[in-house]
Amino acid sequence: MTKTRTFVAIAALLTLGMLPVLIAPAGAQQTDRAKQIGGKLVCGVGTSLCNCKQILTQCNHVGCMNSSMMLKTLDEKVAKGDAEESIVQAFILEFGREVLAEPPKSGFSLIAWLMPSFYLLAGAALVIFVISRWRKRPAAEAAATSQAAMALPPELLARARAEATRATED
């Protein structure tokens, strides 16, 4: 009888231990659509509850009151069948533009998307220009030096060579 009680107690403990894993926690997203929309939003903005500033669906801040509230709101709006744009606009109205994980790809914010590419291309062009100038410079300087040497009178050149020979013999 004791073995049976032990077995029943262990089974009950395992069942109770697995219960939180089997039952979805309250406030968790139910659909892939909610996860997709939540990935475009930031947790912890616009309220004094939390300031973690993590992606809403990936918020792992322990005790984050903001995350559960925002996820609940998101799930309600998704369950009603609201369009993604209207859900995002509702969050912007409630929390401000800071709730967006990335700037919108329109209007003035488009510059935030285009400028890194522009700077990369401009930097590459500048590097190519500078390197080509460096490669051309030594050849031009060597030609200028040889032409200057040709312009020296032979007796001046001989005197300079003799002086250089004397300086290096000592």
Image: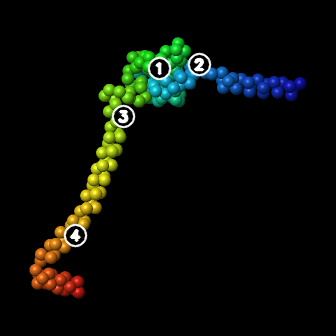
* Secondary structure at numbered mark 4: helix
- Of labels 4 and 1, the one closer to you: 4
Vertical order, 146 against 44 (above or below) = below
* Whole-percent x, y for residue 69 in the image: 50, 18
Answer yes or no: do the residues labelled 2 and 3 have beta carbons within 8 Å? Answer: no
Mark 1 surroundings within 10 Å by alpha-carbon count, few (fewer than 14), some (14 through 19), many (20 or more): some
Total count of labels: 4
- Which of pointers 3 and 4 lies earlier in the amino acid sequence? 3
Say which amino acid is labelled 1.
Glu
Q: Name the residue under label 2.
A: 26
Report whether 85 appears left or right of 31. Answer: left
Cα–Cα span, label 2 and label 3: 37 Å
Q: Mark 4 points at which residue?
A: 142
* Whole-percent x, y for residue 23 in the image: 66, 21
* Whole-percent x, y for residue 144 in the image: 18, 69
- Which of pointers 2 and 4 lies earlier in the amino acid sequence? 2
146 or 87, which is in the foreground? 146
Cα–Cα span, label 3 and label 1: 22 Å
Say which amino acid is labelled 3.
Trp
- Which of pointers 3 and 1 lies earlier in the amino acid sequence? 1
Cα–Cα span, label 2 and label 1: 22 Å
Say which amino acid is labelled 2.
Ala
Mark 4 surroundings within 10 Å by alpha-carbon count, few (fewer than 14), some (14 through 19), many (20 or more): few
* Secondary structure at numbered mark 2: loop
- Which of pointers 4 and 1 lies earlier in the amino acid sequence? 1
- Which of pointers 2 and 1 lies earlier in the amino acid sequence? 2
Q: Name the residue under label 3.
A: 113
Report whether 76 appears left or right of 45. Answer: right
